[in-house]
Image (cartoon, rainbow, N blue to C red):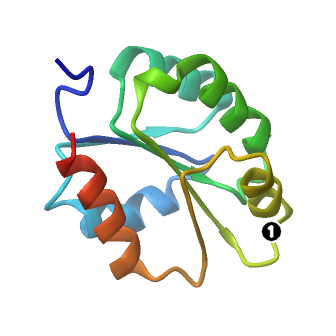
Amino acid sequence: MSVHSDRSVLLIDDQTLTYFLLEPLLTRDVDRLLLATTETDAIQLVFREKPTVVIVNLTAPTMQVVELSRTLRERHENDFKAMVGLGYTSSANATDGQAVGVFDQIYRRPIDYSSFRDYVSSTLRSG
């Protein structure tokens, strides 16, 4: 039996704007869209909620997102199916995260929202 009992997505971002942008995009496919605004919240939510997909804003200025993502991948890899990074083309975090193999997929801004939604949706369905 899968640890992912629902189609839940955790967004890790220090601001709520991305949450409100993604919510209508994912509403058809996601049962629960969770938000973690600190590293501590992110680790606790991954452990407690076991989201199917973790989305990390790679440009969150108050967070060490690559280190956090690496920690989640090393300590909680069985608690989620996929980790997705969202970042600017020139984001050092996107390059660093991709280089260390932390993310399953990285979407650089401007984001192709159709492709992004298709990836999240197919990951949730493969459940």
Nearer the observer, 63 or 52: 52
Residue 17 at least partly seen: yes
Q: Is residue 46 above or below residue 117?
A: above
Q: Is residue 79 above or below residue 107?
A: above
In the displayed structure, 74 sits above or below 126; it is above
Q: Position of residue 66 (x, y in %)?
A: 76, 43
45 and 101: which is toward the camera:
101
**Looking at the figure, which quarter contains the N terminus?**
top left
99 vs 67, nearest the viewer: 99
User: Residue at the spot x=17%, y=26% of the render?
Assistant: 5
In the image, 7: left or right of 21? Answer: left
The residue at the point 61 percent across, 49 percent down is: 103
Q: Is residue 5 left or right of residue 11?
A: left
Residue 121 image offset from top left, x and y in percent: 25, 59
Quick check: can you spot residue 63? no
* Left or right: 24, with 59 as reference point: left
- Give the percent coordinates (x, y) of residue 77: 52, 26
For the point 80% across and 62% down, which residue is it? 95
Q: Quadrant of the C terminus?
A: top left
From the viewer's perspective, tell me whether residue 11 is left or right of residue 98: left
- At 51% from the left and 17% from the top, the residue drawn is 44
Q: Element at badge 1? A: loop
Q: Amino acid at mark 1?
A: Ser
**Mark 1 = which residue?**
91
